[in-house]
């Protein structure tokens, strides 16, 4: 029984390792996730803030869904021990303090998650003014996390 | 009137340019989108194919939503003229034939889109066997597009 349990734990650990991957892979995947989110954020900014005459409901809704999907994807798995140093697509900008600020990070991550999922809901309505307001809240949640754990460029 | 129209076209063109961005940015964003999809594909593969004892319905559903969000995000906008040469996160692997194969690419992209959205639906049910089958179809749609337009490594 004990042997079975140990085996199960080993298998689960190796499965998690396969998902999380080595340090460079975790960094590369999280840089990819945030860049994909950034592209979708730029589409909403363009259509809602900078050039509202180009607003397209379907495009904005798809972009909002993409941001929510990033928020819901379990990014925490990509912040394994040691990932404050290393090169994914480029050198990581994660502050080493990340690992001492887990509680604050969890709050910030949850705020982003709630804001992004609400944006996806609001975007589906096509109400530009409501989208703009909620988009601002997502932006604030991004910034608060960046201030907390990302090295400034 | 003519002036107004010209201005509107210019504004729209500049908005599109802001969204699509220069060649390097288009390449970087599409590499990010596919890498984010690849991470989520690896999570489903791990939990459905390689280590089914680690299957977690919510995790697989979130991963499937992420893949669908990538498929729905309007990736075509990142394949502007000239993007068969250039460095995003790394040198692009897009074959120059892409621009002569637009119809085949559209069919392949639509197949991926349909398969990915169906996977998101199936994943929400938690039916592992059905997820595995549909996951295989998504994989086939990935491969057919890679064979068509991606330079082999």
Image (tube, coloured by chain):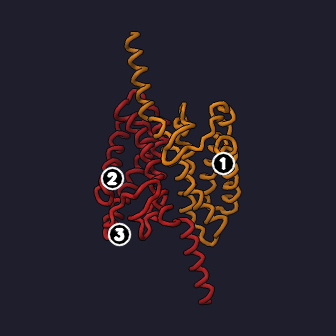
Chain colours: A red, B orange
| Residue at x 40%, y 46% (from the top left corner) | A119
Name the chain letter of the residue that bears numbered label 3.
A
Name the chain letter of the residue that bears numbered label 2.
A
Q: Around disc 1, counting alpha carbons within 10 Å, would you say few (fewer than 14), some (14 to 19), or many (20 or more)?
A: few
| Residue at x 57%, y 37% (from the top left corner) | B84
**Separation (CA) of disc 2 from disc 1:** 40 Å
Q: Residue B29, percent across and down? A: 48, 44
Q: Secondary structure at mark 1?
A: loop
From where the camera sits, is residue B112 visible?
Answer: yes
| Residue at x 63%, y 85% (from the top left corner) | A4
Residue picked out by circle 3: A99
Q: Secondary structure at mark 3?
A: helix
Name the chain letter of the residue that bears numbered label 1.
B
Q: Are marks 3 and 1 in contact (CB under 8 Å)?
A: no
User: Can you say whether B109 is above or below B34 in the image?
Assistant: above
What is the quadrant of the N terminus of chain A in the image? bottom right
Residue picked out by circle 1: B152
Quarter of the image where one finds residue B133: bottom right
Residue picked out by circle 2: A141
User: Can you say whether B99 is above or below B5 in the image?
Assistant: below
Q: Around disc 2, counting alpha carbons within 10 Å, would you say few (fewer than 14), some (14 to 19), or many (20 or more)?
A: many
Q: Nearer the viewer, residue B46 or A124?
A: B46
Mark 3 and mark 1 on one chain: no
């Amino acid at each position: 029984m004990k042997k079975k349990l140990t085996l199960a734990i080993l298998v689960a650990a190796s499965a998690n390792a396969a998902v999380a991957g080595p340090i460079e892979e975790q960094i590369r995947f999280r840089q990819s996730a945030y860049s994909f989110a950034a592209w979708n954020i730029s589409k909403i900014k363009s259509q809602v803030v900078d050039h509202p005459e180009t607003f397209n409901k379907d495009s904005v809704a798809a972009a909002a869904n993409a941001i929510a999907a990033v928020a819901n994807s379990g990014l925490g798995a990509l912040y394994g021990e040691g990932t404050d140093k290393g090169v994914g697509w480029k050198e990581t900008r994660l502050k080493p303090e990340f690992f001492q600020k887990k509680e604050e990070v969890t709050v910030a991550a949850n705020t982003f998650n709630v804001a992004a999922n609400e944006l996806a809901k609001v975007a589906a309505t096509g109400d530009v003014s409501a989208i703009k307001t909620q988009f601002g809240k997502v932006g604030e949640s991004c910034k608060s996390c960046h201030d907390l754990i990302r090295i400034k460029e």
